[in-house]
Each structure stands twice: as C-alpha cells, then as structure tokens.
Image (spheres, helix red, strand yellow):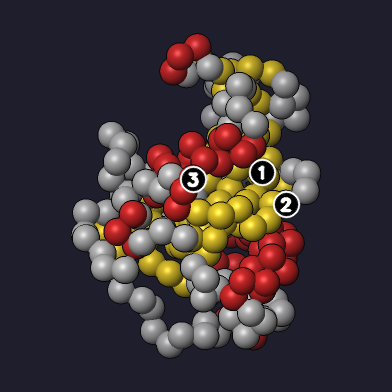
C-alpha cells in the first residue's frame, strides 16, 4: 500500500494503489435489534461510526480504537457478533476528492463489524476527545440507515447490513431484523423519530 501523511507517534495513514483508504465500520446493536445512529458534528448528516486504519493496526484493533474515540465505549461494553469478509468499497463524490494531495484518496475500502451493546447507556459518551465526530445519537431500526445515510454510502451500507443481519437475528430475533425488503426500509417499525441524545446529556439505562 502507498503511504500518505504521518500521524501521531510515527504511525502512517495508508492509501492503496487504487486510491482507497482502509477503513472500519461499526454497527452497534442493542439486544432488541435497534442500532446506534449518530449525527456528525456541525453537519446535518447521520451515519454509523467509522474510521481509517493506521498502518500498524489490524481491522479489529482499528475498530476498538474508533469505537472508543467516537462513542466512548471500551471493549468490555460490547461483544463482537460478526464481521464482513474482505473489503467493501465506496467512492467519494468528486467534490470531496482532494486532487492536490500527493496521494489522492478516491474512496474507502471497509471491513464492517456488528457489535452487541452490553453496557449501560450512560457509558455512551461522544465528548471524550478534543475533536468529537458526533454531537447527537439515537437508536433506530436495523434497516433504517439504508434510506437515511448519504447517497454515496448506501451501496456499502446495504452490503454490510445484509451480511450482518443473520448474526443480528441470532440475538434480536427475526421480528426485530426482518428480511431487507423495500417496505421494511421505508417504514420503520417504531412510529416517530426517537429523541436525540446529545453528547453531554446523562442517560439512564
């Protein structure tokens, strides 16, 4: 893989010869089948936690680091239920590609993890770093993100959730994670949007 700019402690970010940066994605699931859905700071965009891998990390190591940085959760707050095989790729829109960088990143290639949330909601903290990724969060139905994530990520989200759904059903049951038919995507099981959870709000479990 080609290497780009240096980051902390001499670790280097990598971009592969095709222009894709290795990345991990995280589907954090409550035992009832709902998943953690968060709003990016200063943007009106919602997504799952995700982040780039450093050159000295395995996907599992990167996942635990990103989980703590973006949600405040430690390994003892989750259980790994499943992982996608190989890489899932998406391209960035043209406006987001930095053409003047020495090594141009055209998109992400991702390994996705399904985690069961085993902690208390008070363990979820979005404000533990100097540069938080998210400022609000909520629990949503398993397939809800397919119709609500930014368009250029929808293909990867569909592939990841379809692969991880059987693992989710083992915990939440088939009623909570039905087959991914269009009607299921368009009509969330729970009417109305759940109340937002801001980064600093204490939450009762």
| Quarter of the image where one finds residue 167 | bottom right
The residue indicated by pointer 1 is 110
**Which callout, 1 or 3, points at the residue further toward the start of the chain?**
3
Quadrant where the C terminus lies?
bottom left
Quadrant where the N terminus lies?
top right
Q: Estimate how packed mark 1 is, as few (under 14), some (14 to 19) or many (20 or more) residues with alpha carbons within 10 Å.
A: many
| Residue nearer the viewer, 93 or 190 | 190
Residue 197 x/y as whole percent: 29, 64
Q: Give the secondary structure at mark 3.
A: helix
Give the residue displayed 56% in from the left and 18% down from the top: 12
Residue 162 x/y as whole percent: 72, 66
| Quarter of the image where one finds residue 98 | top right
Give the residue displayed 38% in from the left and 67% down from the top: 138
Q: CA distance from mark 1 to mark 3?
A: 20 Å
Residue 46 relative to residue 99: left or right: left
Give the residue displayed 54% in from the left and 61% down from the top: 116
Residue 158 x/y as whole percent: 68, 63
User: Extreme left residue here?
Assistant: 201
């Amino acid at each position: 893989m080609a290497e780009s700019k240096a980051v902390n402690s001499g670790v280097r970010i990598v971009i592969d010869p095709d222009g894709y940066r290795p990345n991990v994605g995280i589907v954090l699931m409550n035992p009832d089948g709902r998943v953690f859905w968060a709003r990016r700071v200063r943007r009106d965009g919602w997504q799952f936690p995700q982040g780039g891998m450093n050159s000295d990390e395995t996907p599992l190591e990167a996942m635990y680091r990103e989980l703590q940085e973006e949600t405040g959760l430690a390994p003892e707050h989750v259980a790994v239920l499943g992982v996608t095989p190989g890489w899932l790729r998406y391209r960035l829109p043209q406006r987001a590609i930095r053409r003047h960088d020495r090594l141009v990143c055209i998109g992400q290639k991702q390994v996705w993890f399904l985690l069961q949330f085993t902690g208390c909601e008070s363990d979820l903290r979005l404000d533990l770093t100097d540069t938080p990724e998210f400022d609000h969060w909520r629990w949503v139905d398993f397939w809800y993100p397919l119709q609500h994530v930014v368009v250029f990520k929808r293909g990867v989200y569909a592939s990841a959730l379809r692969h991880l759904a059987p693992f989710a059903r083992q915990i939440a049951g088939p009623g909570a994670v039905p087959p991914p038919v269009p009607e299921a995507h368009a009509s969330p099981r729970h009417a109305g949007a759940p109340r937002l959870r801001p980064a600093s709000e204490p939450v009762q479990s």
